[in-house]
Amino acid sequence: LACLAGLDEPDGGMVRIDGQSLSRRSEADRAVVRARTIGMLFQSANLLEHVTVMQNVQIAQRLARGGQQPSAATVLDELGISERSRAYPSELSGGELARAGLAVALANQPRVLLADEPTGELDQMNALRLITLLRERARAGTAVVVVTHSDAVAADADRVVALRDGQVVLGPPSRHCDEATQPAPTDPDEPPPCRCTALRPSAHAARQPSRW
């Protein structure tokens, strides 16, 4: 995920987002692309502790500097957390923290959402709610990539990508990957692209990315 977000350079190949190269560019350039096109959701520490939920979203929007953005209040309302907009992170429950973190990740309507173990610290009910929110974003057109060890999260993905012995293996599309609603592939032999992708660890590769 660090390579996909432009936080690290890949050893080989290129990372492109919405036609823009993210690799082999200065950190300043990558930071601009990241702020405008990529949302990042972590297992924890998604919020600045010394400001409110609303201010966290507003700060993320100011960093993007440009483009049409929904109001911070609209983002919070869509995720069902508007009533906690004036609360500080330390005052939020686990489920509220997850939704507030997702609000920050979606503050600028990113083309790509990268989520690293987003349900790792949630109970089953809140994890299901977060998965539902991610699925809704995928249906709205956001490309969602999630790293997780959760079988429930992986089962809800359009595609599971496994790393086996250091090699990437693409799994078949899931029941969610509806060919009628997906862009046509450029190669007729390729399966249609999917909106939600899971990264799954191999049993033989201890520190490889996991699933969504």
Image: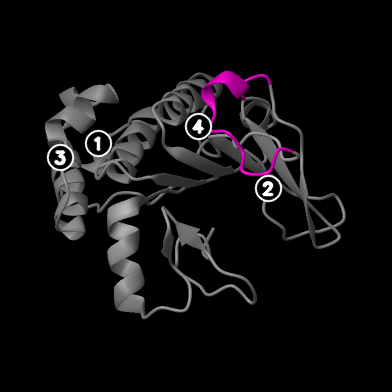
Secondary structure beneath label 2: loop
Instruction: Tell me the distance, in whole angstroms, between the alpha carbons under discs 1 and 3.
Output: 13 Å
Q: Which residues are magenta?
A: 175-188
Q: CA distance from mark 1 to mark 2?
A: 31 Å
Kindly state the secondary structure of the residue where label 1 is placed.
Answer: helix
Q: Who comes first in sequence, dot 4 or dot 2?
A: 4
Label 3: which secondary element = helix
Image quarter of residue 206? bottom right
N-terminal-most mark, 4 or 1: 1
Amino acid type, callout 1: Glu
**Of the two numbered discs 3 and 2 in the rendering, the one whose residue sits closer to the viewer:** 2
Label annotation for residue 122:
4
- Marks 1 and 3: CB-CB under 8 Å? no
182 drawn magenta: yes
Separation (CA) of disc 4 from disc 2? 17 Å
- In the rendered image, is residue 47 in sight? yes
Which of the pair 72/9 is nearer the observer? 9
